[in-house]
Image (cartoon, grey):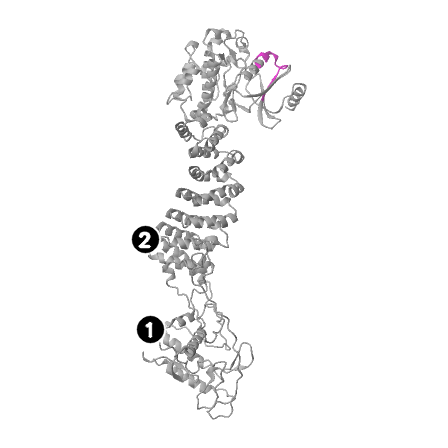
Amino acid sequence: MDFLKSAVASAIAKGPPFPYTFGDKVDLDPSVWSLYNGTRREDGSDCSIFSFDILANRSALPLAKNALKKLRTLRHPGVIKVLDTVETESYIYIATERLVPLSWHVKRKSLSPETAKWGLYTIAKTLKFVNDEASSIHGNLKVASIYTSESGEWKLGGFEVLSNVKDDDAVIYTYGSLVPDSGRYAPPELARSGWDAIRRSPHSAVDSYDFGILIFEVFNGSFMGGDQVGQTKNIPPSMQSSYKRLTNANPKARLSVGHFLEQGKRSGSFFDSALIKLTDGVENLGVKSETEREAFLDDLDQITDDFPEDFFRLKILPELLKSVEFGGGGPKAFGVVMKIAAKLSSEDFDSKVTPVVVRLFSNPDRAIRVCLLDNLPLMIDKLSQKVVNDKIFPQIVSGFTDIAPVVREQTLKSVLVLITKLSDRTINGELLRYLAKTANDEQPGIRTNTTICLGKIAKYLGTGSRAKVLMAAFGRSLRDPFVHARNAALMALAVTGDYFSEEDCAARLLPAMCPLLIDKEKLIRDQANKTIDIYLQRIRKTAAAMPDTALPPETAASAGPRMGTPQPAESSSTASAWAGWAISSFTNKLSAAAGEIEPSTTNGGSNPVPSSSSTAAASAPAPKRPGPVSAPQTASSASALRRQALKSPPPSAPISRVSSTGNMGGESFFPEDPELDDDEIGAWGDMEEGTGDAGGDDNFFGFGSSQPASMSSSTTLPKRATAKPGSAAPAAVPFDDGSEPDFAGWLAAQAQKKTGGAGGKALPKGLAKASPTSRPATAGSAGAAAKKTVPVVARPKAAPVKKIDMKPKDTGDEDGWGDGW
């Protein structure tokens, strides 16, 4: 093989320039030619090279020269396309389009029936042209004379004895017998009388007989001799009658190839197929009328998997793409394009289809856009991420705001297909902003599909904003008047529960879903129960793993009483249980209290300020250094108080306060009015105050000011006290984490109200705070000589009370999601 290549190269060097490079030799049936794969040096394109060595086979030189002459002059789509030729005294080279011998496919029986009929139809048209228009006889028709191009089309070659009937010295009469295997394919009259018998018969008779043998060979794989002529094995039934007439032993009774072609093209006949109609009409697709184009595209829809892929890739696809982009082929033609493109390799798709697809997405035609979106699943795997993210998606987003609902809906559905090809920045930025708009769409179906879409793409969202985005979107859908939108929100919450924290599940999502337990639609009620059960199981599992308490363990040095927890068995009613709990919580601590309450100090100084609870009766002198209270007295006081507390008072008797000595005083512990006014309610704080800030993210995402009535009616925003003109500056509000009631704050509010308000009662003795600017009371009778003065300590200036605007925050976004997505 290497020797042959070197010999060819040396011959080329001695002869005229031949701008092609020889490659591998192709196995070929007996022929005067050798076939090589080749490439064009200029651009590297593929080609085939027929080579004839004159010195080695001089007897067949007239056949090679005749073939060279006919290939140069005969032009037809069904004839081998010649690129270049070279003829010298030692060799003949013919460069053609890249070819593969048909015998390869026939021997492997890889031709489908439709492809075989399409190939025979092409050869029949070419033979009709040779016999009728060119007035010639091929004389060498067989499988070895036919090749397939890169597009899968059958091309006629073997022109070694092709002759014009008007030429008396035609090569076929003299050299016909020199063609390899000529005896096996020769008709009976030539076998009896020689090739000169052609003159006494119709000139098409030889080609008709050989075409009949070709039909048998294509459908059966091989032709062994004259005994098989006329057999109908494996030949399509619709073709058998005409096939027998082609192989008639009487040359004058044979059916010409032209008549065979006409019979096959009749309606319902063997050449009346979608593939053959396709090949006939594709080249003129751009100039067809609207009706003809529709009929042609209808035939294209009938294509099946056994059609030649190469032909569709190289012939049909380019014509269809031109028709879609420039010729008015429309969505129907693009649907066929996608059907063909699905079989292309990634490289072919990138070079042939991707540029057209990118240009089509910029086309303002809505029908084209919807067709592109419908076929997006067929092409997404072959589109690179860079092309989708940088070129296609920026064109697609215009569909989110299109006035046509069908465009908006198809654009929304395409998100599920595109999501894997989009960058994180695009997903969490531009895409979410557009989804926020479709979530507020006037079409309920689009709103529902937005919720479904978010549930399916949740795993692609950024972890930092995913929970907020989903809670905002699903929370809004839970309040949608469209039943399927609410159902979609519940189903989406059921499958995305892992993306929310336990706090969000308990404090925000469950309260939002609970109203749907009594929805008017049973579908919603059933789904709400299922979804809520999922969240409850998760919360219960989390709660079971939590400690019993977060409070630190109690020690003997702990200051301040802590209330005990009532047991259900200790009381028979809620009212009695509450009363017993309140009284016993004080008495339990009296036994541990001993000595006097130490005076407190101001925030910034060291001077002591007497406590208001250290005052005694007016007639009893107070010792300068009070001694410790003896244990028996303390126990006695506590026992007496406990006995008095356990004695149930009548319903009309007020609950009395506990004096500093352990006796029941005459002042009421709680205010006389059982209804707490607004200031008192505000002093307790609101359970949502920590999360309901009007300026926070929660309000921005729809769980603040945009709550439904069923959610917001149970939440009362706390009132904030403001300083009145002329009154004392309010005390600084201590930090409150919302976990315990602010009992000290409540007392302070009572003291300020009772002492500072007009006409209000003063707090009972022992609970009122001494004014920092007044002198302390004397500890003794009115005539006591020793009075201890306390220096006046300036009260620190309180910080101005922050006013909170309770109006909903204006996010600047009509849909309420905005950039928070």
* Residue 510 painted magenta: no
Please tell me which residue is depicted at 52% across the width and 74% down the height of the picture. Answer: 797
Residue 26 shown left or right of residue 298 in the figure: right
Q: Are circles 1 and 2 on residues that touch, CB within 8 Å?
A: no
Percent coordinates x, y for residue 433 in the rendering: 47, 50
Question: Alpha-carbon distance for marks 1 and 2?
Answer: 39 Å
Q: Looking at the rendering, which quadrant does residue 726 occupy? A: bottom left
Which residue is under mark 2?
522
Whether residue 167 can be seen here: yes
**What kind of residue is marked 2?**
Lys
Label 1 SS: loop
Please state the extent of the stretch shown in magenta in the rendering.
49-64
Mark 2 crowdedness (10 Å alpha carbons): few <14, some 14-19, many ≥20: few
Whether residue 455 can be seen here: no
Please tell me which residue is depicted at 54% across the width and 24% down the height of the picture. Answer: 99
**What kind of residue is marked 1?**
Ser
Percent coordinates x, y for residue 465 in the rendering: 49, 54
Mark 1 / mark 2, whichever is N-terminal: 2
Which is more toward the observer, 32 or 323?
Answer: 323
Which is more toward the observer, 457 or 363?
Answer: 363
Relative to 272, does residue 746 appear above or below in the rendering?
Answer: below
Which residue is under mark 1?
573
Percent coordinates x, y for residue 614 in the rendering: 47, 84
Q: Looking at the rendering, which quadrant does residue 691 occupy? A: bottom left
